[in-house]
Image: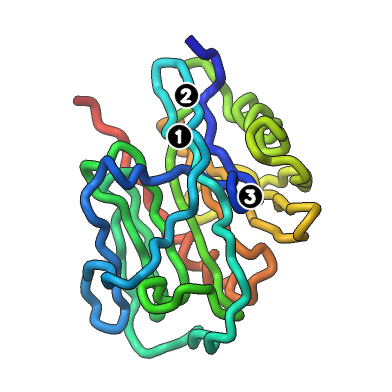
Amino acid sequence: MSTQPNILKVSLLPAAIAILTVLASCQPEELVFDPQSGRWVSPLPTATSPTSPLPTPTVTSGPTPMPPPTPWPPDFTPSPTPTPSPTPEGTPAIIYDPLNRFSVTLLPGWYAYTPDAKAIVGVTSISNYDTRLIDEPPPGSLYIQISIGVLDAGQSFEQWLSDRRVLETSPEYGASGNILTEPQPYTLGRYTGVTYTARDSYSNEGVTVIYLLTSDRRIVGIGLKPADSPMLSDALSILSTLDVSPVTAP
């Protein structure tokens, strides 16, 4: 049996980068929050999925196994589509991820995909453009993925982070050419952790990576693409409303 530690995998290569993925074959259809109507709706038949292409999941061992890694970020290509308005009409809306058990409050004009509660693993994806209608991210866009894992018994956050950063630069895990800045202490809303930038030395694409530790030893993994998006402050405002529900004993 593998002794590989539990991980939340993030990389910058289009084929192998991320925080945690939805296994599409193991869950029902997702719903999308539409800020224009204020309702949860099914994705349009012609829409492209906001989730990224997936690498082979990493099998881990331990009493609290982590979900398999998801590639991060998606293979974005510049598009001539007009920039979405950063302040469209509408009101903030609270969205809840029933699988990972957390909520955030979206600003007007932002969209969210959440996994089904019965899925095996999944991520919540948030963007400031409607991925049901726009195949390619427009200029000024920002895409967020949020997932949650658990530390192994006896494992410290510092140990987990050290192992994690090794994997994020390992060619074995599709992360060849990734350059990581030094992690800096970071507070987001009610949670503390670290943040750093992961950059692909070939394409120069950057992702802002945030890892937060909860009081019940869960790790919130967040990736924001691109790292230099002009919408980063709005995205962090949304993420500052993060509320992770405590794990309840069965």
How far apart are labels 2 and 1 at the CA level? 7 Å
Q: Mark 3 sits on what residue?
A: 186
Residues at circles 2 and 3 in contact by the CB criterion of under 8 Å? no
Expressed as whole percent of the image width and height from the top left, the position of residue 211 reads 57, 44
Is disc 2 in contact with disc 1, using a CB cutoff of under 8 Å?
Answer: yes
Does residue 183 appear to the left or right of 128 in the view shown?
right
- In this view, the residue in front, 11 or 104, is 11
Amino acid found under the numbered disc labelled 3: Tyr
Q: Nearer the viewer, residue 237 or 8?
A: 8
Residue visible at 71% across and 52% down in the picture:
197
Q: What residue lies at 27% left-to-right and 72% top-to-bottom? A: 44
Q: CA distance from mark 1 to mark 3?
A: 25 Å
Side of 44 relative to 51 (left or right):
left
Horizontal and vertical percent for residue 17?
Answer: 59, 46
Foreground label between 1 and 3? 1
Q: Earlier in the sequence, mark 1 or mark 3?
A: 1
Residue on which disc 1 sits: 68
As rendered, which of 203 and 230 lies closer to the eye?
203
How many residues crowd around disc 2 within 10 Å: few (fewer than 14), some, or many (20 or more)? Answer: some
Element type at mark 3:
strand
Measured as percent of width and height from the top left, residue 127 is found at 46, 69
The answer to which image quadrant residue 43 occupies is bottom left
Q: Quadrant of the C terminus?
A: top left
The numbered dot on residue 59 is 2
